[in-house]
């Protein structure tokens, strides 16, 4: 049983910062580690704008494979706990690096998807962006779609690749949430990819207590106010219940 003595006595605004580890128990592969995607695929050949320019079909195929895989996955207890928290504490938000859409499928609504969504397609310049695939069926056009508004421009997955800037509104919102929350809960991220890896530090510097949940220590747990070691689906639900008990 976790002792929640590290929690502030009154909590109204929580920011949850989630990474691939929160979806691991839903069987969505993480990126790093033994079973991670980067074990079998090279990031620079698939998750960069240069990779898409060099071989759009290969990149498209890889994302189609991932969409099909994710469409068979269900939100787990950790996604449901986040949705429960967001409903109970209306000023709380989820900032996720994940593109899988599982927070939304668990019923959460106040979500900042800072690395975009695998269920969106867009032009390179973001002037055209839309939801395209049905997450329930995972159906994906076999051919890469072309922009209607900007002929001769291919549409691409609506995610943020290495070397690309994050959408400015999402980035500003995430930073503001980290500065103004009563509590920052980090869950299932290796804390290696910037700028998201710097969000917990922004909270810490603003005097916001930081809790890290992970199956193993990370650089974030080294400065967090509390580290809860364990799978997100087991560690998060009791924490959320305790936070809700302290709210209002
Ligand atoms: C569990 C668990 C369980 C498992 N329960 N836990 C500053 C310094 C150095 C470099 C940079 C910097 N600023 C920018 C950069 C460059 C770059 C970067 O950070 N590189 C680093 C690798 C060094 N960043 C960028 O390029 C970003 N753009 C940018 O900053 O623009 C301006 C700029 C550009 C260039 C130079 C300078 C400025 C964009 C980053 C985009 C990241 N995109 C990806 C792919 C998204 C699309 C897709 O899905 O295909 O996003 S990469 C991948 O990593 C994905 C993830 O969102 C991201 C983070 O991964 P995450 O979520 O942490 O997953 P894992 O797998 O790493 O970790 C899982 C964790 O879960 C582990 O800790 C496990 O232990 C744990 N776990 N089971 C709880 N059951």
Image (cartoon, grey):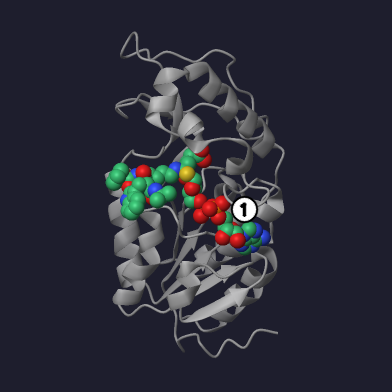
Name the residue carrying label 1.
33
The residue nearer to you, when weighing 90 against 194, is: 194
The residue nearer to you, when weighing 12 against 22, is: 22
Left or right of residue 32, residue 166 in this image = left
At a point 32% along the width and 14% down the height, the residue shown is 149
- The residue tagged with tag 1: helix, strand or loop? loop
Residue 99 in picture, x, y percent from top left: 51, 43
Residue 80 appears anywhere in the view = no
Q: In which quarter of the image is the N terminus?
A: bottom right
At a point 50% along the width and 85% down the height, the residue shown is 7
Assess disc 1: are there few (<14), some (14-19) or many (≥20) residues with their C-alpha within 10 Å of its C-alpha. Answer: few
- Image height of 178 relative to 108, above or below: below
- Image height of 150 relative to 121, above or below: above
Residue 190 in picture, x, y percent from top left: 52, 59
At a point 61% along the width and 68% down the height, the residue shown is 216
Residue 106 in picture, x, y percent from top left: 62, 52
The residue nearer to you, when weighing 160 against 132, is: 160
Left or right of residue 169, residue 233 in this image = right
- Image height of 103 relative to 123, above or below: below
Furthest toward the top, the residue is: 152
């Amino acid at each position: 049983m976790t002792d929640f003595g590290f929690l502030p006595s009154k909590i109204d605004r929580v920011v949850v910062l989630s990474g691939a580890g929160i979806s691991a128990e839903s069987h969505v592969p993480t990126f790093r580690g033994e079973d991670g995607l980067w074990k079998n695929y090279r990031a620079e050949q698939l998750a960069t704008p240069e990779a898409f320019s060099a071989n759009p079909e290969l990149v498209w195929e890889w994302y189609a494979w991932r969409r099909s895989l994710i469409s068979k996955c269900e939100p787990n207890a950790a996604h449901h706990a986040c949705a429960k928290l967001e409903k109970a504490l209306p000023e709380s938000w989820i900032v996720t690096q994940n593109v899988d859409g599982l927070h939304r499928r668990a019923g959460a609504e106040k979500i900042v998807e800072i690395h975009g969504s695998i269920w969106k397609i867009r032009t390179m310049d973001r002037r055209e962006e839309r939801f395209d695939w049905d997450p329930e069926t995972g159906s994906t056009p076999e051919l890469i779609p072309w922009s209607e508004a900007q002929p001769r421009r291919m549409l691409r997955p609506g995610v943020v690749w290495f070397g690309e800037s994050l959408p400015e509104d999402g980035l500003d919102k995430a930073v503001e949430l980290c500065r103004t929350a009563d509590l920052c809960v980090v869950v299932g991220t290796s804390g290696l990819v910037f700028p998201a890896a710097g969000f917990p530090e922004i909270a810490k510097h603003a005097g916001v207590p930081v809790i890290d949940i992970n199956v193993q220590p990370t650089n974030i747990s080294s400065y967090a106010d509390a580290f809860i070691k364990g799978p997100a689906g087991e560690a998060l639900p009791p924490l959320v219940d305790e936070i809700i008990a302290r709210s209002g």
